[in-house]
């Protein structure tokens, strides 16, 4: 169960805004986190608390293929990103590093910054505790759920190679 | 029922009857990384406990985004890539060779290939009819180790291009116009497949420009048929044997068809801070520009430099406007030296950079100051893209860029041609 306050953004939040190109040579999640959302919301790091939820409207994570962007978000303590839809490379990258994403138009439409959400990923529900609303979300298809449970693509592949199932 | 080009390639490479929406595991013909996302891919490869590359000669590590290295930290990233290449037998493409996507187009991509790279503009070689797409470092690390990866077979959007480009209007104007039309998420998760009489007549350089920007509409891939233009291009690069014709089935099912007659098209510019924020150049005339950048995987080819040289010949760039040019590859640079383009550009006031990404992504070689405006031939104008969130980036064709360099303000290239 995930629970936290919502930080809501608009459309087309790109990966340069999430993690600018000049920081791509940083190596650890801790270092990357220091610059998370630097160009999109310079106040973000002062506001975010562990477990908080990031929200956006359409095309979140568009642009560069940098996996550093979801790493920085995960490192900031964000437990889940909810948007109407995501850019495709970002979607894969987030799942691959174990940052859960949910696509749900209704939740985005009825949630504001500062609301508290409670998310049950396996049960497929999102509760807006501030507004006393409950939403259903579809769960991940087959191996994507396994991938998240394993802790990301690298760990998933390693486990499968060890059991010779690749 | 017929198949789109994406479905045909993924069927061939997965050994399944791949249809839009299916999840398939496909063989990877080429996997590559570059120097900003490659070090993370190497670390992920190592943390996964992988020891060997599935196909060392089909794994390429490009050093192109920060060349030559501007600081010790990036130099150490370069060292990591070189050392990984030595340990695993991967192919190294080092400082001075050029931008990964240009080199993949010149030397590596074949029609019908499946290619993954840890860079979103990996879509570029779709111009050659390869299913080629960008992924993150972990995905590419696993593809390097296993020689295969998973795909959700994308639905297709057919783009039928008709008519003739008018003087001063180019492939770049077309793709900016298309992205403005369908939006930055207009093709998210989809395959953009280009066809029509204007595509049949289009040079490979132009096809690569268009495919390169497919991702700016969110597309997974931007595909062109492989035809006589492709055959001649491959032969010209000394690899005629890599050619095989390919095209979508005549009865392929597309989710949507977009028809564009380029005869009506005007020079088009993307305004800050999104690529789909387009306008005809005529509406933006007079905006003062402090830097013009010609180059990148979008527009750093010989044909692009030729267009700029035609406009700049015998002229000088405006005293308050810096002109920066970066050829996309060593081969482009050599040709530009041989045929006198470099002399024209330097006489016109250009600073010539080594083959590579140049200032496109804000690491070095032309980072903008507060409030400065750049007209760039690159593919992205996001806030902060060129290293400063207080700067503004406009995108246009090499002709618009060259005309703007001369006058110091955004200029319709048709006025100076």
Image: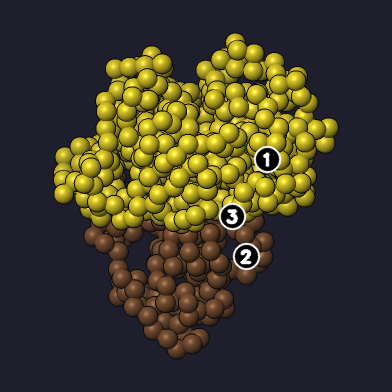
Q: Which chain contains the residue that carries disc 3?
A: B
Q: Quadrant of the image for the C terminus of chain B?
A: top right
Mark 3 residue element: loop
Residue designated by label 3: B277
Q: Which chain contains the residue that carries disc 2?
A: A
Residue at image coords 33%, 59%: A148
Residue B245 spot, x, y in % from top left: 27, 28
Q: Is residue B90 left or right of residue A24?
A: left
Residue B192 spot, x, y in % from top left: 37, 46
Q: Is residue B84 visible?
A: no
Residue at image coords 78%, 38%: B408
Residue A36's place in the image compared with B143, above or below, is: below
Most extreme residue toward the bottom is A132
Q: How far apart are marks 1 and 3 (CA)?
A: 18 Å
Q: Say whether mark 3 and mark 1 are on the same chain.
A: yes
Circles 2 and 1: CB atoms closer than 8 Å:
no
Residue B337 spot, x, y in % from top left: 62, 13
Q: In this view, does B384 lie to the left or right of B117?
A: right
Q: Distance between the residues labelled 2 and 1?
A: 41 Å
Task: Identify the colour of chain A in the image.
Answer: brown
Residue designated by label 1: B412
Most extreme residue toward the top is B338
Residue at image coords 22%, 41%: B249
First along the sequence among labels 1 and 3: 3
Residue A107 spot, x, y in % from top left: 43, 76
Residue designated by label 2: A44
């Amino acid at each position: 169960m995930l629970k936290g306050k919502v930080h809501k953004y608009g459309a087309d939040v790109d990966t340069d805004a999430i993690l600018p190109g000049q920081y791509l040579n940083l190596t650890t999640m801790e270092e990357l986190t220091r610059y998370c959302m630097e160009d999109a919301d310079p106040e973000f790091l002062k506001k975010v608390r562990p477990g908080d939820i990031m929200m956006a409207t359409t095309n979140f994570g568009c642009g560069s293929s940098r996996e550093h962007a979801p790493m920085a978000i995960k490192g900031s303590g964000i437990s889940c990103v909810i948007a109407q839809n995501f850019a495709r490379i970002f979607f894969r990258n987030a799942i691959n590093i174990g940052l859960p994403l949910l696509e749900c138009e209704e939740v985005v439409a009825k949630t504001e910054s500062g609301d508290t959400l409670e998310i049950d990923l396996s049960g497929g529900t999102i509760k807006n505790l501030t507004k006393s609303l409950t939403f259903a979300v579809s769960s991940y298809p087959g191996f994507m759920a396994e991938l998240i449970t394993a802790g990301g693509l690298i760990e998933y592949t390693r486990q499968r190679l060890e059991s010779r199932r690749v | 029922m017929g198949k789109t080009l994406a479905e045909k390639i993924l069927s061939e490479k997965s050994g399944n009857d791949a249809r839009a929406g299916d999840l398939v595991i496909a063989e990877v013909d080429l996997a590559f990384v570059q120097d900003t996302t490659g070090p993370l891919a190497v670390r992920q490869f190592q943390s996964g406990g992988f020891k060997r590359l599935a196909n060392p000669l089909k794994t390429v590590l490009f050093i192109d985004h920060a060349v030559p290295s501007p600081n010790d930290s990036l130099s150490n990233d370069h060292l990591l890539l070189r050392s990984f290449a030595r340990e695993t037998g991967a192919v190294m493409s080092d400082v001075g060779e050029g931008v990964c996507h240009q080199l993949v187009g010149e030397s590596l991509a074949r029609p019908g290939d499946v290619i993954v790279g840890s860079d979103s503009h990996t879509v570029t070689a779709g111009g050659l009819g390869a299913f080629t797409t960008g992924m993150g470092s972990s995905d590419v690390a696993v593809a390097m180790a296993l020689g295969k990866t998973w795909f959700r077979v994308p639905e297709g959007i057919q783009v039928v291009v008709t008519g003739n480009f008018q003087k001063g209007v180019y492939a770049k104007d077309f793709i900016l116009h298309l992205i403005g039309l369908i939006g930055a998420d207009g093709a998210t998760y989809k395959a953009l497949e280009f066809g029509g009489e204007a595509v049949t007549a289009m040079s490979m350089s132009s096809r690569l420009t268009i495919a390169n920007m497919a991702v700016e509409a969110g597309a997974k891939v931007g595909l062109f048929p492989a035809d006589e233009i492709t055959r001649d291009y491959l032969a010209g690069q000394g690899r005629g044997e890599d050619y095989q014709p390919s095209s979508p089935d005549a009865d392929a099912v597309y989710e949507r068809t977009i028809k564009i007659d380029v005869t009506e098209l005007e020079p088009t510019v993307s305004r800050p801070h999104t690529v789909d924020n387009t306008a005809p150049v005529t509406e933006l005339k007079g905006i003062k520009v402090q830097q013009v950048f010609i180059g990148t995987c979008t527009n750093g080819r010989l044909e692009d430099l030729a267009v700029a040289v035609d406009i700049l010949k015998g002229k000088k760039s405006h005293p308050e406007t810096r002109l920066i040019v970066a050829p996309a590859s060593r081969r482009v640079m050599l040709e530009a030296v041989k045929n006198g383009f470099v002399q024209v550009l330097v006489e016109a006031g250009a600073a010539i950079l080594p083959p590579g990404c140049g200032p496109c992504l804000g690491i070095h070689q032309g980072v903008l100051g507060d409030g400065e405006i750049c007209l760039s031939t690159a593919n992205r104008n996001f806030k902060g893209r060129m290293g400063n969130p207080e700067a503004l980036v406009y995108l246009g064709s090499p002709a618009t860029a060259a005309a703007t360099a001369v006058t110091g303000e955004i200029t319709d290239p048709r006025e100076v041609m």
